[in-house]
Image (cartoon, rainbow, N blue to C red):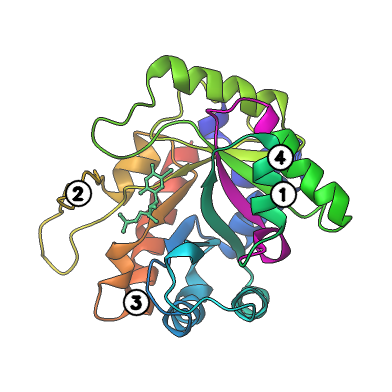
Amino acid sequence: ERLKMTFDARAEKSTNMMSARLLRLMATKRTNLCVAGDLRSSAAVLRLADAVGPYICVFKTHVDALDDFSGQFGPQLCEIAKTHNFLIMEDRKFGDIGNTVSLQYGAGNFSVAAWADLVTVHALPGPGIIDGLVSCLETHRAHLKDRACFIVAEMSCKDALTTASYRSEAMKLAETRVDFVAGVVSQSASGIPSPGLIQLTPGVRAGVNGTPQSDSDGLGQQYNSPRHVVLERGADVAVVGRGVTEAPDSAEAAKFYRDLLWEAYLERVSE
Ligand code: 5BU
């Protein structure tokens, strides 16, 4: 069964080069933590990536929320990713027709395809959105082999419209396009069709130093504990944003989350 398999064993079953690469990275580095670097300045995001780098498998960005994005951001983040051995995910949540996402992915100010190993994609437009992203990589003739996406099958926020039937259609889309799909963003493992697909789960926060576990942020985000998302909801990679960025010491916090998440993973695959 998928959830009982080790990341290494699942990498063997993987049909996508990037999911295999990420699963092996997680197994080797012994971390299933993704930190969401949702800060306002490029320098602050780069500083954060460098500080949490030793403890993460993926660093997740929202570059359209930066006050001072410049063309140097991507290459600088790639340098830090190389030093600490993690992948970069731009959480762009593409959601348009193929032609438009192809432009948004490869061009514009952000040139996401040039520096982000992974991107997130809404399932809403159907298979054409994957075709659009792949065609962008084909025309640029670069990165065809070292890029992949995660399909947003289910959102973490309260009253999200990602219903059970939407979720199951999104899973089908993931399965039919494993050439470019490395995994799904989801709050549970139900219906994930293949052991090679990676479940990324945001909405994770723990009570630190005796402070109580918060279960929401006042704007619809819903939080679960690291242990709960890995053991009860099937998270392979857990995303922690403010749990790390609002902590007094982000490296300490990342280490704390890494330990809790990895321990939960070991418990899940043990026996
Ligand atoms: P937080 O600070 O841990 O709440 O940040 C969560 C991050 O994950 C943030 O960057 C969101 O944009 C992202 N996210 C999410 O919270 N829920 C979802 O369903 C998806 C992405 Br998809």
Label 3 or label 2, whichever lies nearer to me, is 2
Q: Residues within 10 Å of mark 4 (few under 14, many from 20)?
A: some
Of mark 4 and mark 3, the one earlier in the sequence is: 4
Q: Please report contact status of discs 3 and 2: CB closer than 8 Å, yes or no.
A: no
Which residue position holds label 1? 18
Q: Position of residue 208 (x, y in %)?
A: 19, 65
* Residue range (magenta): 110-129
Q: Please report contact status of discs 2 and 4: CB closer than 8 Å, yes or no.
A: no
Looking at the picture, which amino acid does disc 2 mark? Answer: Leu
Q: Does residue 222 lie above or below 87 as drawn?
A: above
Q: Position of residue 20 (x, y in %)?
A: 71, 46
Q: Which type of secondary structure does the marked residue at label 1 adopt?
A: helix
Magenta-colored stretch includes residue 125 = yes
Of mark 4 and mark 1, the one earlier in the sequence is: 1
Q: Please report contact status of discs 4 and 1: CB closer than 8 Å, yes or no.
A: no
Which residue position holds label 3? 250
Of mark 1 and mark 2, the one earlier in the sequence is: 1
Near-viewer residue (141 or 104): 104
Which residue position holds label 4? 99
Q: Does residue 239 lie above or below 258 as drawn?
A: above
Q: Does residue 81 lie above or below 133 as drawn?
A: below
Task: For marks 1 and 2, give the CA distance.
Answer: 33 Å
Q: Position of residue 184 (x, y in %)?
A: 54, 36
Q: Is residue 239 left or right of residue 117?
A: left
Residue 9 shows up from this direction: no
Which residue position holds label 2? 219
Looking at the picture, which amino acid does disc 1 mark? Answer: Met
Residue at the image point whose x is 40% and y is 31% from the top: 188
Residue 153 shows up from this direction: yes
